[in-house]
Amino acid sequence: MGTKYAKLMCLHREDSTNKSPVVFVHGFPDSPGMFAAYYALEEREQPWLKGRSIYCYAFPNRHDNPDFPPLWQLAKGVMAREFDQAMNELSLQSPTGKLIFLSHDWGATHTWRWARKQKNPPIEKLVAFSVGSSFRYDIFEHGLNAFTWLYGLWFCAPYYLPFLRKTVSWSIVNGAGYRSDTAAGLWKDTYHYWDRPRLLLTILPQVFFGLFYQPEYLDFSFPVLYMRSPKDRIASTAAFERLVRSRPDCRFVLYAEYNHWFPEQNSDVVLPEVRTFLGDNRE
């Protein structure tokens, strides 16, 4: 089930089970290691994880999969195709035909996109960190914050202006609050922004003129635990958050005191929410 650039890694295979597998999908600029506390050996005895196969989807990253795609492949959507193929195949292998996702940032973006493309998404439950169901660069809802997506031009700078590599890495750690012991190489994980100049052809018309909009993705049937920090508001919409709050099978959590990387940096606070939402009392 391997892919050319991304990797689907099996951390634990449960052969005699009737439970859906759990899939961890990391974001930017992380690796599957960001979920280490979630799939630790002692955590696997918790009801939500016990008796399940466990997978991690690793986008190219500097930690454990430094196979970065070239710009022309990014522009052709190779990351989306690889993710879709891997999840389609994994869901077919699932004993229930469904998957349980814990997805952060870019990983959540791909998970929502994959779900939206299907009439009946094979998702049992989704824990979405930071990113809601629809990207809408909406100046009427987000105001001037709609233009904060221009940060992508800064993150693409290491490709076009290599002398800015250290500065870009420094800004992510010191300006945005990302923690990394390998900050010097962090710029490498900005690769998925490197085609951002091309995307401006669609992003800016959305902001200025409301072109290229898709309707919000609000008719998903699977339960969702959505958790975000204040800075993640631009990756969400009011309608999505109202829906999550209103559905008895969903839950919304706002961590007002944390930054974008709260799933890793504050796992001791987040994990109780995950256990409650994904808890499985069947024995």
Image: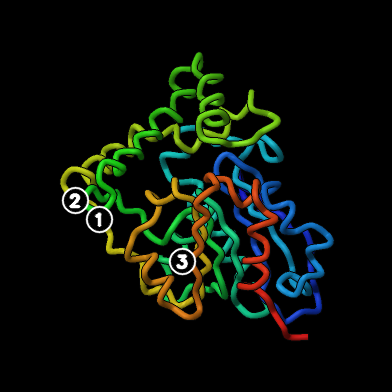
Q: Earlier in the sequence, mark 2 or mark 3?
A: 3
Location of residue 130 with respect to 89 vertically, above or below: above
Query: Can you say which quadrant of the picture contains the C terminus?
Result: bottom right
Question: Which residue is denoted by mark 2 in the rendering?
Answer: 210
Taking the image as shown, residue 136 lies to the left or right of residue 249, namely left
Residue 140, given in percent of the width and then of the height, sits at: 21, 51
Residue at point 73%, 70% (across, down): 49
**Residue for badge 1:** 213
Label 2 to label 3, Cα distance in Å?
A: 24 Å
The correct choice, above or below, for 151 with respect to 100 in the image is above
Q: Nearer the viewer, residue 10 or 29?
A: 29
Q: Picture coordinates of residue 60 (x, y %)?
A: 61, 41
Q: Nearer the viewer, residue 82 or 102?
A: 102
Whether residues under marks 2 and 1 lie with C-beta atoms below 8 angstroms apart, the answer is: yes
Kind of residue sitting beneath label 1: Tyr
Q: Position of residue 146 (x, y in %)?
A: 29, 44
Three-letter amino acid code at the position of disc 3: Ala
